[in-house]
Amino acid sequence: METLFEVVVFLAIATFGAALARRLGLLAPILLVVLGLGLSYLPFFPDVRLDPNLVLVGILPPLLYVAALETSVPAFRLNLRPILLLAVGLVLFTAFVVGTVVHLLMPDVPYAICLALGAVVAPPDAVAATAVARKVGLPRRIVTILEGESLVNDATALVLLRVAIAAAGAAGGTVGFGYVAQEVVVATGGGVLVGLLGVLVFGFLHQRTRDPLLDNALSLIVPFAVVFAAEEIHASGVVAVVVTGLGIGHRMPLLMSAASRLQIGAFWRLARFLLEGLVFLLVGLQLPEVLRDLDEPIGRLVGITAAVLLAVFLTRFVWLFPATYLARLVPRVRRRDPAPPVQVPLVIGWAGMRGVVTLAAALALPLTLAGDRPYPRALFIWLAFAVIVATLVVQGATLPAVARRLKLPADDPVQDALTAAAVQQQASRAARERLDALADSVPATVAERARQVLENRTNLAWERLGGAARETPSQAYGRLRQEMIDAEREVFRVARDAGRIPEEVLVRAYRDLDLEESLLRREADE
């Protein structure tokens, strides 16, 4: 009961922090980390010990799954080269640079375990990247690249971490090439196979389920079932969840009814909001646990921390510029994807926030090395914590200003609206042809009503090209219809209170009015 109470308290604090961030115009992840740091110093606040397995198996899979569901597979495939250069190449480069720096500063510590620390701090966090990038309003392609990187890079880092820990625990501190190759093949290949199997199995179940509640429950089960299946064969659960999420998200219009998609979308928005808030709050609350066993001299601690932070900051930029522009020396690549302006790698380089996965991986480091040899594990956990806080607070807080300062070429809203209107025109033509074919099977008034709805939707798409200089007919209709809905809703409420209609009638009427109001608000937001 006490643990349940603490979870409720943490969720309430995370919700309050997110609401405060919106009120102050701040980024919620940063405010929640700072809030957690402050609460950790209060004597009456409970100590929180983060279980790495809870993060890697209980929190990360649903967050990765919902991110993959919302990721465009065509956009992911189109940007596969930069995504893999960041998610695989940059993670390995960062891990080896950080491992080398730490080993040079602490030559008595085996290189393998220093490399393990490099793997811990190498991957930018999926939660942080998505939360901050979308809030800042970066161009669509940059968001796609950052999201794609954050979906895949955890798998690279965790496989490298597993190999490095095995090397640190082996006699002589090395492992054979065969072991490394086996780990990579099993983790990556096995994860892809389990993910594809998840697409087939759960896609089939979604297709056979017509009850939105059952669809929603099944969607909640998917990421955990896929992770457990992958872990059972020692494959990468991260890869498996991402593959399953991409596959089901891409096929979702064919697998689920409209009611199921709406309910699943609402459920995952709430789940992501709560989990993201809880994750960043927990990161800040770990400070006492991180400091508990730390006994390094302050001068040495500051020097090593500064060196690791500098390595983490610089490696991202050192990798990004050659990865961005050297590939364009190949004519085929240059023709297909011209070189972006220098602002693009600069802002991608600045969006390297680390998060809870880094802390969980650090907490999973072994207590001792081969032969029960000690190593500065507490220092390594501190370094991971310092990287998280520094990248979130420094890079995350300044990313909006950096993006504005660089004046990134924004997505063209007029071109977006023009493309949407053109496709809507084609969709309306197809709908009109279907209506004409079926018009004789329904009363004329029904057919005319359907034609009017279709015409309104087409007009709305073209009206968006006109900008916001004046109120469009659709906006005027939405404002007027909102007033009418409010009046209808009040009449039903008064009738229920007077006992003239039962509660069930009120609920059905409110549901229909709420659906129409939600549609009006969505159209107004667009």
Image (cartoon, helix red, strand yellow):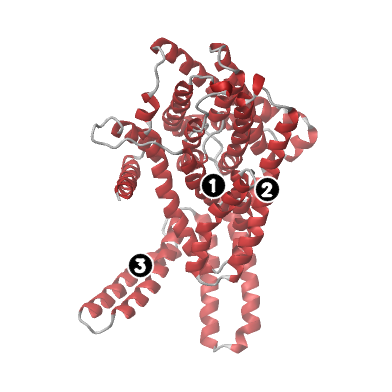
Identity, as a three-letter code, of the amino acid under mark 1? Leu
Nearer to me, 381 or 150:
381
Is tag 3's residue or tag 2's residue first in the polypeptide sequence? 2
Q: Is residue 268 above or below residue 168?
A: below
Q: How many marks?
A: 3
x, y percent for residue 473: 44, 65
Query: Helix or strand or loop: what does disc 1 sit on?
Result: helix
Identity, as a three-letter code, of the amino acid under mark 2? Val
Evaluate whether residue 172 shows in this view.
yes
Q: Residues within 10 Å of mark 2 (few under 14, many from 20)?
A: many
Residue 37 vs residue 180: left or right? left
Mark number displayed over residue 192: 2
Evaluate whether residue 473 shows in this view.
no
x, y percent for residue 165: 59, 28
Mark number displayed over residue 482: 3
Nearer to me, 154 or 87:
154
Label 1 to label 2, Cα distance in Å? 15 Å
Of discs 3 and 1, which sits in the foreground?
1
